Image (cartoon, rainbow, N blue to C red):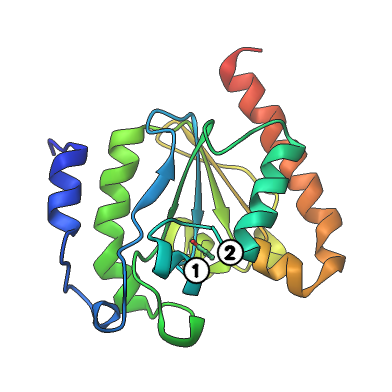
Amino acid sequence: MQTSWTKLYSEIDGCTKCRLCEGRHNIVVGVGNKSADIMFIGEGPGHDEDMQGVPFVGRAGQLLDRMLAAIDLTREDVYIANIVKCRPPSNRNPEDDEAEACIPYLREQFALVRPKLIVCLGSVALRHILGKELRITRERGRWHEKAGVSIIATYHPAALLRDESKKREAWEDMKAIRARYLQIKGE
Ligand code: URA
């Protein structure tokens, strides 16, 4: 399928494919480097993201920035998007039908950015990208290869804010991501 950022943005503009359109202030498409080798995928916008139209700008986003900095990356090195592009009410998880309605947009973003590495942040991204049956506690830190793309899941930064004990494993995952990223870059 031929696509372009202009086509994608015009398709998304005013989207009413699911009920999440009812309460949104902004559609939160993505941020970062549109030719990044690495793409991070979260769950869906929260309050701050909904108000600003940019992914991961609240507390979890600030932690994500620190996680990136810890492996020498910034938002300019990566592309960041979410499974759903409109805020679920009260920050509940997106329903499966909402995610399924929105994922074609994410596929288009993927086709445009063409990352070599995908990081699923948390269980919603893991389930919709790698398989509905998977659990983040078991699956995090494991590499999957799909059509030449390396995919890994780690804890969502919001989960790390709730439970500090997960930080050690998340740090292991970030180091593995760094190593694979350098390998891909040939450094
Ligand atoms: N949590 C997410 O999953 N995505 C965001 O953009 C912000 C918080």
Tag shown at residue 48: 1
Give residue 121's quadrant in the image.
bottom right
Would you say 57 lies left or right of 96 here? right
- Between 124 and 109, the residue placed more toward the observer is 109
The answer to whether marks 1 and 2 mark residues whose Cβ atoms lie closer than 8 Å is yes
Tag shown at residue 58: 2
| Amino acid type of the residue tagged 1 in the rendering | Asp
| Amino acid type of the residue tagged 2 in the rendering | Gly
User: For the view shown, which residue lies furthest in the bottom direction?
Assistant: 90
Q: Determine whether the beta carbon of the residue marked 1 sits less than 8 angstroms from the nearest atom of ligand 1.
A: yes
Relative to 179, say whether 139 is above or below. Answer: below
- Between 29 and 99, the residue placed more toward the observer is 29
Relative to 144, say whether 165 is above or below. Answer: below
Give residue 27's quadrant in the image.
bottom left
Element on which disc 2 rests: loop
Q: Determine whether the beta carbon of the residue marked 2 sits less than 8 angstroms from the nearest atom of ligand 1.
A: yes
Give residue 75's quadrant in the image.
top right
